[in-house]
Amino acid sequence: GMAPGRYNVFVVRKVSESILIDTGKGGDMFKRLQTLSIKAEDIKTILLTHSHGDHVGGLVKDGKKTFPNARLYLTTQELDFWKSARNKELYEQVLKLYGEPEFLIPDEKTKVILPEIVAVDLAGHTPGQVGFLLSSGDEKLIVVADLLHCEAVQFQRPDINFRADNDPKLSAEIRRKTMKRAAEEKWLFVGSHLPFPSAGIVEVDGEAFRFVPTKP
């Protein structure tokens, strides 16, 4: 059957600084940024969870970079994977336009631009995928990227993989581990392909999990 889904990108704002997490394919992202009074040239930092086209496709349009002042961040493992991926032509364009990226260290200790952001190892969907754990006081939010794609199936059956998962066994292991941590530590859980508002709380449900969305 059919299940609802989305392509979500995220903005982290602190005072005058706006950081973008992924770019989707472009699409409505630029209109949505305008509603937040953010111009493309205002984005100085783009954190990339991984290199699939629906997460990096918005970096280039008509052969030009869409964020003229941005530096890119991703893991070394992901950059190596991207070189040989199906969208390697985009990889070549991005490196030519943006230059060599800064490399992320997914050790959950090393800050990423702001002290409130660290990268989390979510390898499996791709070899170098990361999520981002954000802190505000005692509250934490994790952006899990493509840890899962189908809310209706994968919370109840975290062992079921999406066909684009590069390493199905590792994907399932990291999915269960991350959901368990999110439930135990009461993190707000945010996914790139969860239905709007794409954020909620994970609860343990026997051997599985339950997702309780936040109200829009």
Image (cartoon, rainbow, N blue to C red):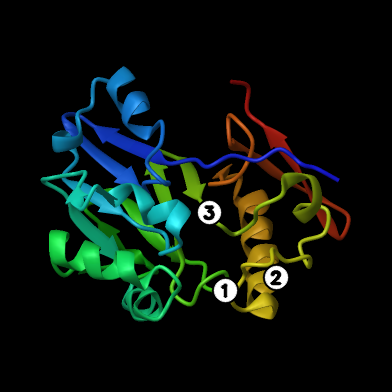
Q: Which amino acid does label 1 sit on?
A: Gly
Q: Position of residue 111 (x, y in %)?
A: 27, 59
Of labels 2 and 3, earlier in sequence is 3
Q: Where 117 sits versus 197, above or below?
A: below
In this view, the residue in front, 173 or 183, is: 173
Circles 1 and 2: CB distance less than 8 Å? yes
Question: Label 1: few (<14), some or many (≥20) within 10 Å?
Answer: many
Q: Residue 124 carries which label?
A: 1
Instruction: Of the two numbered discs 1 and 2 on the same chain, state the one appearing first in sequence.
Output: 1
Q: Which residue lies furthest to the front in this view?
A: 62
115 vs 44, left or right, is right
Q: Distance between the residues labelled 3 and 1?
A: 12 Å
Q: In this view, does 85 lie above or below 163?
A: below
Between 205 and 91, the one nearer to me in the picture: 91
Amino acid at dot 3: Val
Tell me if 200 is positioned left or right of 86 in this view.
Answer: right
The quadrant in which residue 178 appears is bottom right
Q: Is residue 128 above or below residue 176?
A: below
What SS does tag 1 mark? loop
Q: Mark 2 points at which residue?
A: 172
Residue 132: percent from left, percent from top: 42, 54
Of the pair 142 and 139, the residue shown nearer to us: 142
Looking at the image, residue 18 sits to the left or right of residue 11; the answer is left
Name the residue beneath numbered marker 3: 144
